Image (cartoon, coloured by chain):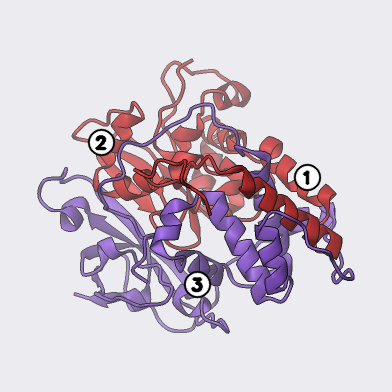
Chain colours: A red, B purple
Amino acid sequence: MSHDDHDHDHDHDHTDPPAETALRVKALETLLTRRGYVSTEALDAVVDMFETKVGPRNGARVVAKAWADPAYKKRLLERPTEAIAEFGFINRQGEHMRVVENTPRVHNVVVCTLCSCYPWPVLGLPPVWYKSSAYRARVVIEPRAVLSEFGLKVPEDVEVRVWDSTAELRYMVLPERPAGTDGMGEEQLADLVTRDSMIGTGGTRTP
Amino acid sequence: MNGLHDVGGMHGFGPIEIDPNEPVFHAPWEGRVFAMALAMGGHFKIPLDRSRFLMESVAPIDRVALGYYERWMNRLFQVSEMRDILSKDEVRVCKAGTTPETGSVRAKALTRADLEGLFNTIRSSSRPITARAAFRIGDKVRAKVMNPTGHTRIPRYVRGRMGEVIGDHGGHVFPDTNALDPPREDPCRLYTVKFAATELWGAEVNRRDSVCVELWERYLEPL
């Protein structure tokens, strides 16, 4: 294992690995394919699914519908897994969804301090920072400092409530509907929802 | 286990490195590792909790040196060997970056439909239990002081701390026993417990702030 060309002053969650890693993975794939355990076509399909189909646009549609339709919002908060499944977003890592609502009094933010649990069906795969030790270590002890690194200032009199995903429940934040969006349809509203606003580390876009 | 994975509240990691234009996979091999992990899950048949424990058991020095998907890759090799899908020799040759000569086809390949099926298969960890709830919403509880050497999902930063039950999720598979070999689901009631930030970190932090953590009944004691 030669990592000598790497500067080890921090942990490597965003690693830029040596070329031999790619060779190892290629060898493993070739062997497992020849043995019949996997097929290239099937692996391509999984990569494509997560690169193009499963991602934060799914969650944005859920949030937009909750903003536009009070009855849906009620279902989303009370029976989130079922309400999200109305869109067909019901699969691995979304078995037990919970939706936590931001209000003028409470700002929610989601983490997994023990690994990197994340609601795949609505947000896709997590960004590197979400999986990093820095985020996982710090957001529970100094959430306001972490949020300010994302450019989010939460007023002192608003509670910051951090949700640590230690079990199989998966969290999505329902951000507040931005001002000046009266009369907008769900499609337009969905364009205002950012991935980070559904993790709690960012705001929504302004129209 | 008190491992390097359990980082909540640690210092020294520096600022959060945010890349606003990050791709889903940073190199093609990351996507292949992810897809193989999903596909091989159908052959490995080990519980998620066991899989997490294998990851946590990597020696701290190796954990720090390896990237996220490199750790996934190593686990693929490890479990393939554990499950006699690959021999020790084959793993060694693959790790050297070359593909070993292969014998006969051993398994039925998963098709694209099988894999989509795997992703779409709901794996609920809810289980019916008959035991009555020891705690009710609003109860004050203490997270036990405990230091299990196996897999556990009670983070170190809440152990010994007092909180309030704010959610009851019924029975869920208990990770500590489900990670054993052979696994035992041993379902147990799962709660959400809300801890005041000041209870966890001291008087210096904003007294309004809180951290909510899912904890199984076996991790909790009444006050």
Question: In the shown orientation, is residue B42 left or right of residue A185?
Answer: right
Disc 2 residue type (three-letter): Ala
* Residue drawn at the location 24% of the way across and 70% of the way down: B141
* Residue drawn at the location 41% of the way across and 19% of the way down: A179
Q: Quadrant of the N terminus of chain B?
A: bottom left
Local secondary structure at mark 1: helix
Q: Earlier in the sequence, mark 1 or mark 2?
A: 1
Percent across and percent down for residue A102 are 37, 38
Question: In the shown orientation, is residue A153 left or right of residue B93?
Answer: left
Characterize the local packing of mark 1: few (<14), some (14-19) or many (20 or more) Cα atoms within 10 angstroms: some
Q: Which of B43 and A9 is in front in this view?
A: A9
Percent across and percent down for residue B101 are 83, 64
Q: Quadrant of residue B184?
A: bottom right
Disc 3 residue type (three-letter): His
Disc 1 residue type (three-letter): Asp
Please name the residue that numbered disc 3 is placed on. Answer: B172
**What is the distance, in whole Å, between disc 3 and disc 2 at their CAs?**
34 Å
Local secondary structure at mark 2: helix
Closer to the observer: label 1 or label 2? 1
Q: Do labels 3 and 2 share a chain?
A: no
Q: Which of A99 and B199 is in front in this view?
A: B199
Percent across and percent down for residue B52 are 51, 65
**What is the distance, in whole Å, between disc 1 and disc 2 at their CAs?**
40 Å
Circle 2 chain: A
Q: In which quarter of the image is residue A107?
A: top left
* Residue drawn at the location 26% of the way across and 46% of the way down: B12
Please name the residue that numbered disc 1 is placed on. Answer: A44
Please name the residue that numbered disc 2 is placed on. Answer: A145
Q: Is residue A72 visible?
A: yes
Q: Do the residues labelled 1 and 2 touch (CB within 8 Å)?
A: no
Question: In the shown orientation, is residue B98 left or right of residue A136?
Answer: right
Q: Quadrant of residue A64?
A: top right
